[in-house]
Amino acid sequence: MLKIGLLYPDLLGTYGDGGNAQVLAYRARARGIATEIVETRVGDALVDADLYLLGGGEDGPQRLAADLLRESDFVRRVGDGASVFAVCAGLQILGTSFAVEGDAHYPGVGLVDAVTTRGARRSVGDMAAVVGDNTLVGFENHGGVTTLGEGLAPFGTMQRGVGNDGHVDGYKQGHIVATYAHGPALALNPWCADVLLEMALDQSLEPLHLIADDLHAQRVRAVLGN
């Protein structure tokens, strides 16, 4: 049984981020893999899961989510092998610190060596990043600039948009993947959902071609203009 843990959707679900759990569950079940989506909300004990999902949210909810994760055994669970996929504010939370209103800095969970400061202007619009042989497409809407520590690899290289700093997007470390493509990013990038499933299951999956895969190719051409 694959357990997908949606973390604080009442705080980090501003942009329909829970759709990522639905995409993962659908593509797992289409391959005959039993899957359950479990949630941790404010006031709940942290659920046990194979793959945890963090979404986007505003400054106040983001700070509270960071506090709750630090106070839980989330770091231990990830250290024990649980996978993580984070988008937007979730990306910032997993780092060592992030900036909130007034450019005040707030401690993150500290799972990765990444620091987010306030940018001169907000980054809003379509984005595309090359990730290996694939292209991640999505929409970004954030005011942060994220600097990766030495040894922390970016998830992708920007082709359009800003991502972390105008050059790269997100990061990948062990079983942790993060991107600035916010909201239900996996609905636009089914290949990425499969990468996460293989990571969480620690096994290779049979190829699965659905209409979402065709739509991804169309979206890439639309965003990159080719």
Image (cartoon, helix red, strand yellow):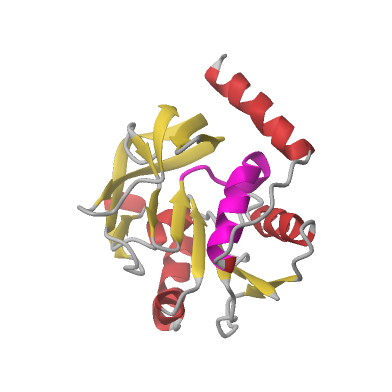
Picture quadrant where residue 130 is located: top left
Q: Which residues are magenta?
A: 180-200
Residue 6 seen in render: yes
Instruction: Reply yes or no: does residue 182 show up in magenta.
Output: yes
Q: What's the residue at 79%, 63% (across, down)?
A: 32
Instruction: Reply yes or no: does residue 123 show up in magenta.
Output: no
Picture quadrant where residue 25 is located: bottom right
Q: Position of residue 52 (x, y in %)?
A: 55, 67
Look at the picture and state if 34 lies above or below 20: below
Q: What's the residue at 35%, 41% (across, down)?
A: 164
Disc count in the image?
A: 0
Look at the picture and state if 71 lies above or below 189: below
Q: Is residue 121 left or right of residue 16?
A: left
Picture quadrant where residue 18 is located: bottom right
Q: Position of residue 71 (x, y in %)?
A: 41, 82
Q: Is residue 19 left or right of residue 164?
A: right
Residue 183 seen in render: no
**Which residue is nearer to you in this view: 54 or 173?**
173
